[in-house]
Image (tube, rainbow, N blue to C red):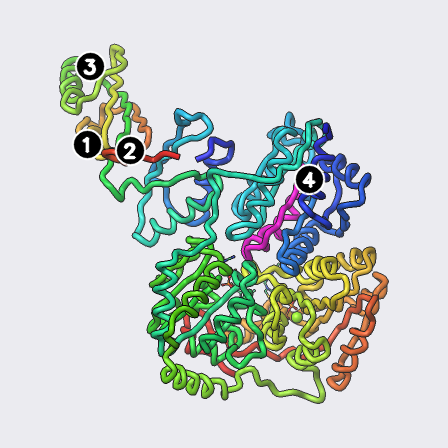
Amino acid sequence: MELTGAEILVRFLKDEGVKHIFGYPGGAVLHIYDALYQQEDVEHILVRHEQGATHAADGYARATGKPGVALVTSGPGATNAVTGIATAYMDSIPLVVITGQVPTNMIGNDAFQEVDSVGITRPCVKHNFLVKHVDDLAITLKRAFYIATTGRPGPVVVDVPKDVTAAKADYVFPRKVQMRSYNPVTKGHIGQIKRAVKLMLSAKRPMLYTGGGVILGGGSKLLTEMTQLLGFPITNTLMGLGAYPGTDRQFLGMLGMHGTYEANMAMHHCDVLIAIGARFDDRVTGNIEKFCTKAKIIHVDIDPSSISKNVRVDIPIVGTVDQVLQDMLDVLKAKTLKPDQDGLKNWWQQIEEWRKTDCLKYENSKKIIKPQYVLENLYKVTRGNAYVTSDVGQHQMWTAQFYKFSKPYRWINSGGLGTMGFGLPAAMGAQIAHPRSTVVCVTGEGSIQMCIQELATCLQYGLPIKIITLNNHCLGMVRQWQEFFYGGRYAMSYMDSLPDFVKLAESYGHVGMRIEDPADVASALKEAMSMKNKLVFMDFITDQTENVYPMIPAGAGLNEMILI
Amino acid sequence: MENEAGALSRVAGLFSARGYNIESLTVAPTEDASMSRLTLVTRGSEEIIEQITKQLNKLIDVIKLQDLSEGTHIEREILLIKVKAMDNGREEMMRLTDIFRGSIIDVTEQAFTVEVTGTGEKLDAFIEAVDKQLIIETVRSGVTGIARGDKCLRV
Ligand SMILES: Cc1cc2nc3c(=O)[nH]c(=O)nc-3n(C[C@H](O)[C@H](O)[C@H](O)COP(=O)(O)OP(=O)(O)OC[C@H]3O[C@@H](n4cnc5c(N)ncnc54)[C@H](O)[C@@H]3O)c2cc1C
Ligand SMILES: Cc1ncc(C[n+]2csc(CCOP(=O)(O)OP(=O)(O)O)c2C)c(N)n1
Ligand SMILES: [Mg+2]
């Protein structure tokens, strides 16, 4: 069947099972928009800024485990998309971003709205393509989806010149791809897995440290089963929250810079560390010299370059979490050996001592709203079932600490790049993917203004997101560093001239609420959640002086936390 | 690697983005025109070389990678050097070229162009042996190499 490149692109998306794409039109992609217009299988969501398109596609991917798709025009469309692409890259999120390009005969001529999209995005994509001929279009798109979703996931950019979308070619959906230069492994080495299990069973002070890879690889159930079978303590990275039930006794909370006392102390003192789908990020390890010095380390990861990058490990296992965890469980169950029960008993006693520090405690107030109090109530009101996105800052850390995520795909935030402006468009993606679920965006008055324009998109598509702004009138996370490390010189961290968010929400056609009295927090949240079909923008005026604790200062070890 | 536009810049970009250094780099298509072979010389601790290897393997366009320095191997680089050669200096230069098993590949009344092939060190030594005053221009190809014996890099 002969189709134009634009028709091929749209047909391909349908055949690939893509239901939604997020985008913004422009000259270079007009043929594609024309083809989209003439069909109903792929729904296009019109955002208000291309950054929103990539974040929304990203939120969609994080909420479903399926690849997110964005479509933007050449030049400024592509450059606006870059922040979203880099955000997805740092957190290994599967995205396919289609960028329009000037016609092939004009490439390199400084043509109108020309940028070297492949060049600009090269360092922040898993791979990218420039499609030079319509005959290559379908197979290139297939490769893009294959690369984005397999191995260590990541964003793939496909740059499509305008003449390629006009030219005609025969179209058959390419069911399979084979690439001689890309064959990600899945199975872990069974010998290594056996060695790992042996080491785990010999541990006196074992510790499981698991990350975003468990969520990305769909390993949450198996991880929970293995952890409970072993009776070991477990901690999650910021990206791993929800992979293990946050309310379970074996769960010690998040680790790292703003992790719990018990999680970080257990890391520091463990004798066997089992890292699964986590990448030893500097926010997690603190000072590398002081990191887990007493431990033998097992590391399971799909990406060999994550292993022994920052910290030397003793037993590397390259494979996908689901496969490796299944093999580990099989070996464990086949063995008659049990973990060292005496060792574990003492270890748990020690951990319970650390736990008594109650490091997340805060002093509530009757006069001024404490941000932590809002999040505790949010957790209660939504019964821990919401999809929660966040922006970047103090509010992000408090959400991670106080919302006890118990299921994968529920916690959606930018960890690696730390992109302010992520929260609202990501929530749109999550809400599109789960129209009947509660989707909450926890944000700050600084972050929300970075993609506030998407409130219009929310109205257009009837997305009943609940926006919780913890409005402390400051760039709180910046202010906290200035208070601790810059002698309280608050350079540019005060947010002056804030808009009236209630009126702003109303002017976009949504419901706005301002909450200033701690006594109203719970009832306001309930009221907002009961408005099932409305976007509610909740502006909580919170205590500016509140800081995120515990905190590991730069250069310190995990045992050197600042407690409240 | 795949003989694709942009493949080389992915390699170069990786090195600059991650702060690794490229001492030399050569690349040309192989007997199978869909692939090209790239030889790169770099330096670093064992950990850094391990990361470089892993990161290169991660590039989608890289088909296969071999660290030649892990086994015995042959290394070759080519040097073209233009030198002033007049009067009895011409004799002298021919002798030196002979000693290094090089050849004079172009001649004018004033100058010789000499070609020398060998390891990087041999070429260094040759340049060292020529009087600095006489050197007009040098160009080096960068190192390429192959494993000794039956070992090979094939897809
Ligand atoms: C303000 C701020 C503060 C922060 N503070 C903290 C903090 O206190 N604590 C904290 O933990 N983080 C914190 N972060 C986040 C931090 O920057 C990193 O993003 C995070 O620690 C990385 O999480 P991860 O190790 O789980 O890796 P991810 O980025 O989630 O990477 C996943 C890993 O799993 C692997 N993987 C992917 N798929 C699979 C699969 N199928 N099978 C096996 N392996 C797979 C990947 O190769 C990769 O190595 C903070 C971020 C911000 C913005
Ligand atoms: C795009 C972008 N610019 C700058 C930063 C640096 N930064 C990190 S947190 C933060 C403050 C965020 O303020 P707000 O959204 O009000 O959240 P709060 O910390 O007050 O909860 C800033 C400026 C960033 N992460 N992202
Ligand atoms: Mg703020």
Between label 4 and label 3, give the one nearer the viewer: 4
Tag 3: residue type? Met
Tag 2: residue type? Ile
Q: CA distance from mark 1 to mark 4?
A: 60 Å
Q: What numbered label is drawn on residue A532?
A: none
In which quadrant will I find the N terminus of chain B?
A: top left
Question: Do marks 1 and 4 share a subunit?
Answer: no
Tell me if mark 3 has few (under 14), some (14-19) or many (20+) residues whose alpha carbon lies within 10 angstroms of its own: some
Instruction: Tell me if the residue at label 3 has its CB under 8 Å from ligand 1.
Output: no
Which image quarter has ligand 3? bottom right
> What's the residue at 83%, 71% (across, down)?
A531
Chain containing the residue with disc 4: A
Q: Secondary structure at mark 1?
A: helix
Tell me if mark 1 has few (under 14), some (14-19) or many (20+) residues whose alpha carbon lies within 10 angstroms of its own: few
User: x%, y% of residue A490?
Assistant: 59, 71
Tag 1: residue type? Ala
Q: What numbered label is drawn on residue B146?
A: 2
User: x%, y% of residue A392?
Assistant: 61, 65
Chain containing the residue with disc 1: B
Q: CA distance from mark 3 to mark 1?
A: 22 Å
Above or below A451: residue A394: below
Q: Where does the magenta region start and end?
A: A78-100
Image quadrant assignment for residue A370: bottom right
Indicate which disc, 2 or 1, sits on the residue closer to the N terminus: 1
Between label 1 and label 4, give the one nearer the viewer: 4
Above or below A483: residue A58: above
Q: What numbered label is drawn on residue B86?
A: 3
Residue holding disc 1: B125
